[in-house]
Amino acid sequence: MTKAAFIGLGVMGYPMAGHLATAGCDTTVFNRTTAKADQWVKQHGNSRALTPRDACTDKDFAFICVGNDDDLRSVIYGNDSVLAGLSEGSTLIDHTTASAEVAREIEEEAAKRGIHFIDAPVSGGQAGAENGKLTIMCGSDKKAFETAEPIMKIYGQRVMLMGPTGSGQLTKMVNQICFAGLLQSLAEGINFAQRAGLDTEKVFDVLSKGAAQSWQMENRATTMSVGEFDFGFAVDLMRKDLSICMAEAQNNGAALPVTALVDQFYQQVQMKGGSRFDTSSLILNLRE
Ligand SMILES: NC(=O)c1ccc[n+]([C@@H]2O[C@H](COP(=O)([O-])OP(=O)(O)OC[C@H]3O[C@@H](n4cnc5c(N)ncnc54)[C@H](OP(=O)(O)O)[C@@H]3O)[C@@H](O)[C@H]2O)c1
C-alpha cells in the first residue's frame, strides 16, 4: 500500500488528503491547528501526527499545501520538519502557490538527502479540490514526475510536467496574470452594462457564446452583478500570488502593467474590508 503524508489541511489540502485516503493510500496528516487534523481523521480514518517529521517518517510520498514561501520553509526545515522525517528515495510534492525561487531552494536541500522534489501548484479552487478535478502544473525532472503522476491523478484532472524545478510555479504565475486582467475587464463590463440600463442576464447570455467568452464570465457574471463574493479564492491570497508574479517579472524583465494596476485595485478591496471576499469582488471599486 502506498504510504503518504499530507501537511496543511486548509480549504485545499483537507479535501485533497481526503481523496488520497479514499483511494486507499495509507495517509498520515499534519495540521498546525490540531482540531482540523482530528476532524479529518474522524471523517477519513487513517492517522494524524503531531509534527511534520512524524507525519513524513517512513512515507513514499509527502504532500504540502500551506500558505506562502515562509509557511513552506517553516514546515520543510528544522528538527521536526518534513525533510527531517522523509527518507532517501521518497518524493516530496508541494501544492502551495509559492515562488519559483523557494522551489529551487527546496529542491537543492531535498536532493542532498536523496529526496525527489516537485513544485506542483494547483488551479481549480475549492470546488476542484473537493471534486478531485484540479489542474496541477509541475516542475521537476522527468523521473520524479513519472513516479508521482499516478498519485496526483487521484485528485488531478490534468497533471502536466512543465519543465525543471520552478516551472510549475512559473506556470501558475501565468495563470494568475491572465486571471487578474480578465476579472477586472469583466467587472468593468458588468458595471458598464448596468449603468447603461441593459439586462445583464441577457447581455452575458449572448456574450458568452462569442469572442469575449471566459470561464469567469460563465460562472461569475451573475453573482458579480448582484454583489455575491463568497466563492473561495480570497483577495488576500490573490495579492500574495500577484506579489510573487511581480517579483519574478523583475527577474525576467517581463512588463506587467495591468497586473500591477489590478493589484492596486485588490488593495482597495482589502481597504473596504474585503480581504476574505473572492477575487470577483473587484467590481466593488466601480460601485461608487
Ligand atoms: N483556496 C483556493 O481556492 C486556492 C486555489 C488554488 C491555489 N491555492 C493555494 O493553495 C495554498 C493553500 O490555500 P488554502 O486556500 O488551502 O489556504 P488555507 O485554507 O488558508 O489553509 C492554509 C493551510 O496551511 C497551514 N499553514 C499556514 N501557515 C502555516 C505554517 N506557518 N505552519 C504550518 N502550517 C501552516 C494552515 O494551518 P492552520 O489550519 O493551522 O491555519 C492551513 O492548513 C495557498 O498557497 C493558495 O494560494 C488556493
Image: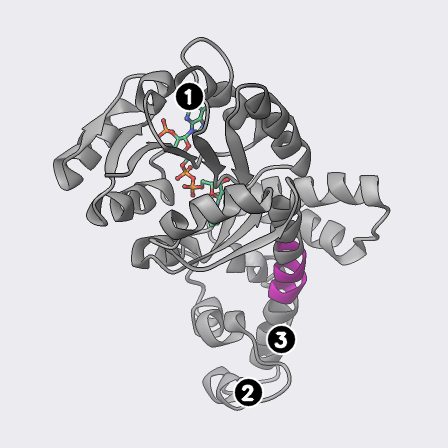
- Earlier residue among tags 1 and 3: 1
Helix, strand or loop under label 2: loop
In the picture, the quarter occupied by the C terminus is bottom right
Helix, strand or loop under label 1: loop
The magenta region covers 176-184
Helix, strand or loop under label 3: helix
**Nearer the observer, 189 or 233:** 233
Q: Which residue is mark 3?
A: 189
In the rendered image, is residue 272 in sight?
no
Crowd tier of the residue under label 3, counting other residues whose Cα lies within 10 Å: few below 14, some 14–19, many 20 or above: some
Q: Position of residue 65 (x, y in %)?
A: 43, 37
- Earlier residue among tags 2 and 3: 3
Q: Position of residue 94 (x, y in %)?
A: 49, 37
**Nearer the observer, 5 or 281:** 5
Identity of the amino acid at label 2? Answer: Leu
Tell me the residue at 64%/52% (across/down).
Answer: 171
Q: Which residue is mark 1?
A: 87
Crowd tier of the residue under label 1, counting other residues whose Cα lies within 10 Å: few below 14, some 14–19, many 20 or above: some
Identity of the amino acid at label 1? Answer: Ser
**Nearer the observer, 92 or 283:** 92
**Residue 194 shown in magenta:** no
In the picture, the quarter occupied by the N terminus is top left
134 on left or right of 286: left
